[in-house]
Every structure is written in structure tokens, then in C-alpha cells.
Image (cartoon, grey):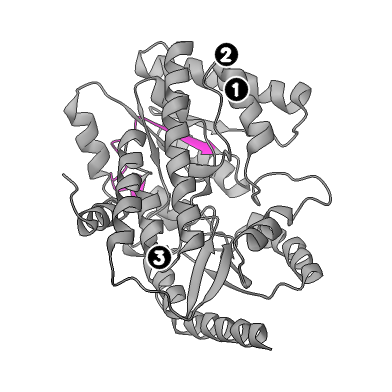
Amino acid sequence: MIQTLDDVLERARSLADDLELAEVRRWKEQQPGRKAVGHMPTYVPRELIHAAGMLPVGVVGGGDRLEIIRGDAYFQSYICRIPRSTIELALSGRLDALDGMLFPAICDVIRNLSGMWSMIFPQRYVHYVDLPQNFDPAVGGLFWRRELETLRRDFEGLSGVRITDEALRSSIAVYNDNRRAIRDLYAARGRQPWIFPFSETWQLLRAGNVLPPEEHTALLRSYLELAPQDVERRDQDRSRVVLVGMFCEQPPYGLVLTLERAGCYVVDDDLLIGLRWLQEDVPAGGDPLDNLVNAYLNHSVMSASRYAPEGHRGRGLIESVERLKAEGVIFCAASFCDPALLDQPMLVSALDRKGIPHTEFKYSEDTGQFAVIREQAGTFSDSIRLWAAV
């Protein structure tokens, strides 16, 4: 039972480091017959998985604690690391608790990973979630509706449970509550990043990859209540920055700590953005599939893996900087991440037009040396404080 802030943080740490999916295995053992469906980062309709009585499980690679041996035999070295570490997790049995796997349309690498997965594990359910890039309701909306209907049938077959409209509405309400808690967490950090530091909120967000949404919401609410009670948390002379580029392959925890120690208050980011992809509540009444379609078309977050019409790229980033009174932006894309790196020049142009300072570096999930990043981030933090004082 969670009683103190230390309890909350220890719980979040243990779940964030759960490469063996021990929490998922415990959940399944509590009631024989339960099933879990994994998904790669960014958006998938978790409500449909939940409505079938299954557990959605976020898979974000092996981080810096996994040595890749067999995974390197399946993918070339000049792509990002997450597909190789995901294959390594699977071949080593760490993902055996998953009864199915979803691969959302993030990039060509993830598309290829879905095909590789089908060949390696032909007995397991796998589906490439082809997200719409056309936001016309008569085109992209119809396409996404049909995709949701396919997933609904697939999940019914996998779980043996019929997904009624009532069950789906109930799951939508559960995830509305979860997304609301995450929005509250980000809003609180934006206001007082010394009370809700980046290194803690990131681990709390990661806990949502393996917890049922109801439990994750309760964990977030406990943190929001307990963190302000710690009188040792005081404001410091740091720069307010926004991070961009971490939406898929996650950084090692040491890099997260490095940015804080370099003098940065991270007031916004795109880490694990799939958990907060929909920016507003999905209506719980009416046709639930239509509601999910409309939410995706009209209330999706801006991301490098999502199409934006000409002239719109950079708008979401500028709005975030201005709303949170950030003093600069740090581009920190995973090495070889095509969506993030191709998006960056357009975002840089948008920042330059507004006179917003920025810097950039690249990382991989197993990055182990942070001295150069700390020096660069520290210099950037110092410089924008000096510019602000001029």
C-alpha cells in the first residue's frame, strides 16, 4: 500500500526497470486466462484492448541494461537501436507474457520490425497499426474506422470476449481519467519543475506501460498529492527548456539525470507520447468507434510520426514554449531516427523565426557516457540565462 512519496517513487522505479515484465506476469497470474497485448511507442487504441479484458503493455526496448547479442543478427547497424533490443527481449523470453503485439506506424524500421516479428513468432498475434495520415473524415476517418473495426474483431478472437459498445465506453472513460492525470502531472511540472522533477515524472509515466490504467492513474494522483508536501524541494537557478525527439526510443535514465544536473528544468517533452496522444477527453456516449476516430482526427498531439499540413509544422512546439514560458529548446533525437531528424530542420526554422534559442544532440538507449552532453546542455542553460539577463 502506498503511503509516502518514497513509496510512490520506489514503485515507479521498479516498474520503469521491469525488463522481465514481472508486473504483467503477476497480473496474468491473478486470474488464469488473462491476456496481454504489447505495443511499440506512440499511439495505439488501448481502449479496445482494455475493453476485451486484456492488458495493454508498452514495449520500449531494453535501455542501457540489455546486452544485444542475437538482435544484431536481424537488423543492420545503421538504424536506431530499439528494434534490435526489442528482438533481443523477445528471443530471450522476457516478452513471453505477451499474447500479441501491435506495431503502430512510426517509421519504416518499425514496419519492418512487425514483419520480422511475424516470421520469428508465427504462432503469436501481430498487427501493424497503419495510422491515418489524411485527416479528412471521409478519407482518413473512414480508413481509421475500418482499422478499429478490424482490431475489435481481432481482440475479440484473441481474448474470447465480445467487445460491446458499453464495455468500450467504459474503457474510454477509464483512459480519459488516465490521460487527465497525465495532463495534470505535466501541467504541475510546467508550473513547478523543482517539485515535480523530470527524472521522477519520466519514471512515473513509464510505469503506465505495464500497469492497468486504473492503477497507473492512482499512482499519478498519489504523487501529485505527496510531492508538494516535501519541504526540501526548493526552486533553483535553472533554465526552463522543452525537449523534442524522444517519442519512440527512450533515453537511458542517466541521460535524464544529466540534463537536470546540467541546470535544466524540463517543462515539456515528447517522451512516451503515445500515453497522452489524445489531447482532450473522448466522449463516452454515442458510438464509441466514431468517438475514437474523431478524437484521433481532431485532438492528436503534434509529433514527428504524424502528418501535419504545410505551414503547421512547428506550431505545437511554439505553443508549448510560449505557454510554459520556456527559455529554450533541446533537440535530443535517437541516433538514426528518421522521423525526428527529418522533422528537426522545419522545427528549427520555426524557432528561429520566433528568436527562440535551441541546441541539439543525439543519443541511443544504451548511451553510457554523458560528459559531452552535460557540458553542452550546461553551456546552453548558462547561455540562455545570460541572454535573458541582457
Magenta part of the chain: 88-103
How far across and down, in percent of the image, does residue 191 sit? 50, 61
Q: Residues within 10 Å of mark 3 (few under 14, many from 20)?
A: many
Nearer the N terminus, badge 2 or badge 1? 2
Kindly tell me whether residue 127 is visible in this rendering: yes
Quadrant for the N terminus in the image: top left
Where is 264 relative to 132, above or below? below
Q: Residue furthest right?
A: 310
Q: Secondary structure at mark 1?
A: helix
Nearer the N terminus, badge 2 or badge 3? 3
For the residues bearing labels 2 and 3, Cβ distance under 8 angstroms? no
| Structural distance between the alpha carbons of marks 1 and 3 | 34 Å
Nearer the N terminus, badge 1 or badge 3? 3
**Pointer 2 residue:** 286
| Structural distance between the alpha carbons of marks 2 and 1 | 8 Å
Residue shown at 35% from the left, 47% from the top: 220
Residue 98, by quadrant, is top left
Residue type beneath disc 1: Asn
Residue 197 numbered mark, or none: 3
**Pointer 1 residue:** 291
Residue shown at 44% from the left, 51% from the top: 185
Residue 257, by quadrant, is bottom left
| Structural distance between the alpha carbons of marks 2 and 3 | 39 Å
Kindly tell me whether residue 39 is visible in this rendering: no
Q: Nearer the viewer, residue 220 or 15?
A: 220
For the residues bearing labels 2 and 1, Cβ distance under 8 angstroms? yes
Q: Is residue 301 magenta?
A: no
Q: Secondary structure at mark 2?
A: loop
